[in-house]
Image (spheres, rainbow, N blue to C red):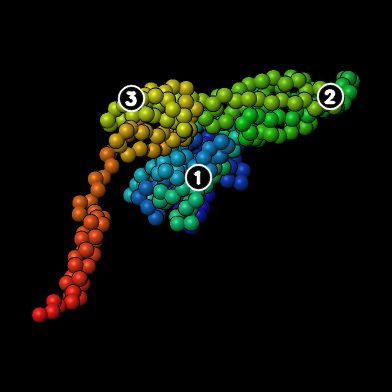
Amino acid sequence: MRYRVLCGGFLLLFMLTGAAAANGSIQTYLGDTVPLSGYCYTSSTVYLFLTGPNLPADGVALDNIYSRADQGGFTEVSVDSNNHWEYDWDTGSLGGGLDAGTYTVWAVDGPNDLSNLNLAQYSTISVTLGIPGIGRVSASTSPGSTVSPVVVPGTLNISSVPANASVVINGNYQGRAPLSVPGLAPGTYLVNFSRFNYESLSATATVEAGATTEVTATLRPKTGTLVINTSPAGAQIAIDGTYVGLSPVTQSGISAGNHTVNATLEGYVPVETGVTVIAGQPVTITLSLAKPASPIPGNLTSLPVPLTISACAGAILLFVFFRPRARA
């Protein structure tokens, strides 16, 4: 099955056997491989990136969600002599887990993220990734059978700390918290929460007929390890303004994401830098400290002594000039 999106001189074909597609979209499951291919007539390389739930706004590379498109992170695919390219997108191997939800795959003829697409030719397709599970079960009644009375549905009000966590109920993506899900038949539901750089969380919620059930999840940040070296060693190290020790320093349990590191050492110019901590992985940085520049020779302020001597010399000359002559 082929899915086509056309944009100017840039043609993108998406193929996935057995997937449902409508209006330029694909529906499949997390962990599946999505074969992507197409034609590009304006560049020898196609740059692929992804946007969607809990991802950075300007996109990430298809093969690593920690590689940001606005920092040069793209999945680069070569275009052959027939202007054709191919790439198999493994949704289960991305350097970190995707959440269930709807994503957009972008194919661009240059290294342009979402904020710079006015400078490039590109095509897109929408991909909805669900959680593998049992499909819907339906039943019908035969003549003479008993029909159960109509049951009044209930509602789930769902929130998360922090907000904007993706919510999946019984394997079906619902959106981002906070949200309200009405029309649920009475019973017990499995609610899954996930958010970028946070541990996933599952909870059960009981829906009662005609009632509203409140569900709140507090997510725990994913953490990594930061190893900080300085040249020379022995500098005072602070992470996000909090002192952590003298270099070299190994600090574990740091929340995944961006942080600021400061290094200070007497007789040296302080250094500040940003660093991205990756969940479950050690990140090592080395900061080089430099001594302050020496004052420029010859740029000294004149002392007041020569001015005082000059003033005295002038007074002596005036005294000699106006001294009366002695009479004979």
At 42% from the left and 25% from the top, the residue drawn is 244
288 or 113: nearer the viewer: 288
Label 1 – label 3 distance at C-alpha? 35 Å
Q: Which residue is mark 1?
A: 58
Residue 248 - label: 3
Q: Which kind of residue does numbered mark 1 sit on?
A: Asp
Which circle, 1 or 3, is nearer the viewer? Answer: 3
Q: Residue 36: in sight, yes or no?
A: no
Counting residues from the start of the chain, the first of labels 2 and 3 encountered is: 2
> In the drawing, does residue 247 fall left or right of residue 318?
right
Q: What is the count of numbered marks?
A: 3
> In the drawing, does residue 43 fall left or right of residue 293?
right
Does 167 sit above or below residue 321?
A: above
Label 2 – label 3 distance at C-alpha? 60 Å
Q: Position of residue 291 (x, y in %)?
A: 27, 39
Q: Secondary structure at mark 2?
A: loop
Q: Which kind of residue does numbered mark 3 sit on?
A: Pro
* Marks 2 and 3 in Cβ contact (< 8 Å): no
* Marks 1 and 2 in Cβ contact (< 8 Å): no
> In the drawing, does residue 75 fall left or right of residue 232?
right
Residue 209 - label: 2
Q: Which kind of residue does numbered mark 2 sit on?
A: Ala
Asked which quadrant contains residue 220, the reply is top right
Q: Looking at the image, which residue sits at the far front?
A: 328
Q: Secondary structure at mark 3?
A: loop
At 22% from the left and 63% from the top, the residue drawn is 312
Placement of the C terminus among the 4 image quadrants: bottom left
Q: Position of residue 93 (x, y in %)?
A: 46, 29
At 54% from the left and 26% from the top, the residue drawn is 221
Which circle, 1 or 2, is nearer the viewer? Answer: 1
* Classed neighbour count for the residue bearing mark 3: other residues with Cα under 10 Å, few (<14), some (14–19), many (≥20): some
